[in-house]
Amino acid sequence: MSAATRSTSRGARSRRAPDRLCAEAVELARAAAEEAAAPGTAGAWLEAVPDPHADRVVTHFFEAQEPGYRGWRWAVTVARASRAKNVTVDESVLVPGPDALLAPEWVPWSERLRPGDLGPGDLLPTDADDLRLEPGYSGADAPPPDSAVAEEQPEARGHSRAAVGAVAEELGMGRPRVLSRYGLHAAADRWEESHGPKTPMAQAAPASCMSCGFLVPLAGSLRQAFGVCSNEYSPADGHVVSLGFGCGGHSEAAVMPKAPQPPPPVIDETVADPFGD
């Protein structure tokens, strides 16, 4: 930590009498601030703060008038050796003042990421210990058919391993990682919140998706509660919806009335139409 920073953060707690020669070196400090700052941005002198942990060390503060640095100050630390009369400049640095405009606290990208931020060409790495995933079964960890640790006969072991691998592939388990129970529940809660029975659209719907012909059920345990909407006129088209969700595009909402047909023309041949001359 620099002397200027130490003086800013700790000087208020333990003020001591500044060294007289260092405190009087205002012009020396100003020249150093003007050299470090952009031309014309080193403003008026504010104060001189002694270093609470060192003798004959004083920091002079000047207003910083640079655009975008509201409330910041130029801090120039000067010092002198014991029994010496010459004051020298230690450092010049731009530091925030008590009412400085500061950038928000940095947040890791993994916490800043929001749904919809991923665009074409973007890569989103998944942590190895992501709670939403758990190891799948690929058969890679099973002993080879001719292994000495295998318990079955070589021929039976080969057929058994192939059969288990085929079943795992069919069930979607032949992947390095699959959805965990936590990930399954998190997805269900998210879908229930966006397209569930408590949404305003579902509350105003004539019926639920459970009886809609446009519902495409999901596979596995999610089939009992969710499906995919396939109605192109529905606001949920292509989205996973709860069976309790609904909208005005329900397949049985209403029967489209036929367009009214005009009555056939009636010709009265017993009446003569008058014609003008």
Image (cartoon, helix red, strand yellow):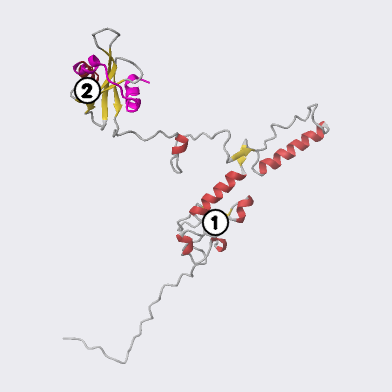
User: Which residue is tagged 1?
Assistant: 242
Element class at badge 2: loop
Expressed as whole percent of the image width and height from the top left, the position of residue 134 reads 62, 38
Decide: is 277 above or below 92.
below
- Is the C terminus in the top left, top right, bottom left or bottom right quadrant? bottom left
Expressed as whole percent of the image width and height from the top left, the position of residue 238 reads 50, 52
Foreground pick, 127 / 237: 127
> Is residue 41 shown to the viewer in this render?
no
Element class at badge 1: strand
Q: Earlier in the sequence, mark 2 or mark 1?
A: 2
User: Which residue is tagged 2?
Assistant: 38
Circle nearer the viewer, 2 or 1: 2
Decide: is 144 above or below 21.
below
Q: Is residue 58 left or right of residue 148?
A: left
> Is residue 195 shown to the viewer in this render?
yes
| Distance in Å between CA atoms under marks 2 and 1 | 61 Å
Expressed as whole percent of the image width and height from the top left, the position of residue 187 reads 55, 47
Residue shown at 66% from the left, 44% from the top: 171
Local crowd at mark 1 within 10 Å, few (<14), some, or many (≥20)?
A: many
Q: Residue furthest top?
A: 83
- Which numbered disc covers residue 222? none
Q: Is residue 9 magenta?
A: yes
- Is the N terminus in the top left, top right, bottom left or bottom right quadrant? top left
Q: Magenta stretch: give its range.
A: 1-27
Amino acid on which the number 1 mark rests in the picture: Ser
Foreground pick, 275 / 191: 191
